[in-house]
Amino acid sequence: MPKIKIYTSNTCSHCSAAKEYLKEKELSYEERNVSTDPSAKKELIGMGYMGVPIIMVDDDVIEGFNKNKLDEIL
């Protein structure tokens, strides 16, 4: 099973859609909420990203919620 980490915020509708999609696929993931976790925000900025969602699947990174790209990687 792939290791999935998703960076989200409380007000991001694309983040909610991505999490719902992963749940529908019965895939477990680690959520890092930049709205409530300052270390998650620091991590995200440190990797060069300013927006969410950022979905990491093993070594692959998807900026935004791109269902086709996610399916391709999974």
Image (cartoon, helix red, strand yellow):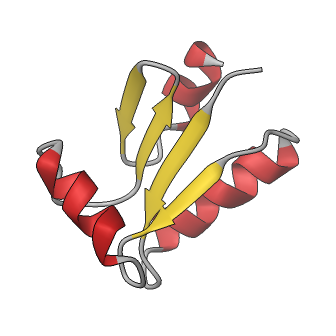
Residue shown at the point (68%, 22%) measured from the top left = 2
Residue shown at the point (50%, 50%) measured from the top left = 6
**Can you tell which quarter of the image residue 31 is in?**
bottom right
On the image, the x and y values in percent for residue 56 come to 46, 35
Is residue 18 in sight in this rendering?
no
Residue shown at the point (45%, 65%) measured from the top left = 8
The quadrant in which the C terminus is found is: top right
Residue in front for this viewpoint, 25 or 41: 41
The quadrant in which the N terminus is found is: top right
Q: Residue furthest front?
A: 39
**Can you tell which quarter of the image residue 26 is in?**
top right
Residue shown at the point (20%, 63%) measured from the top left = 42
On the image, the x and y values in percent for residue 35 come to 37, 82
Question: Above or below — where is 54 with respect to 1?
Answer: below
Question: Above or below — where is 46 with respect to 13?
Answer: above
Left or right for 74, reference 14: right
Left or right for 32, reference 28: left
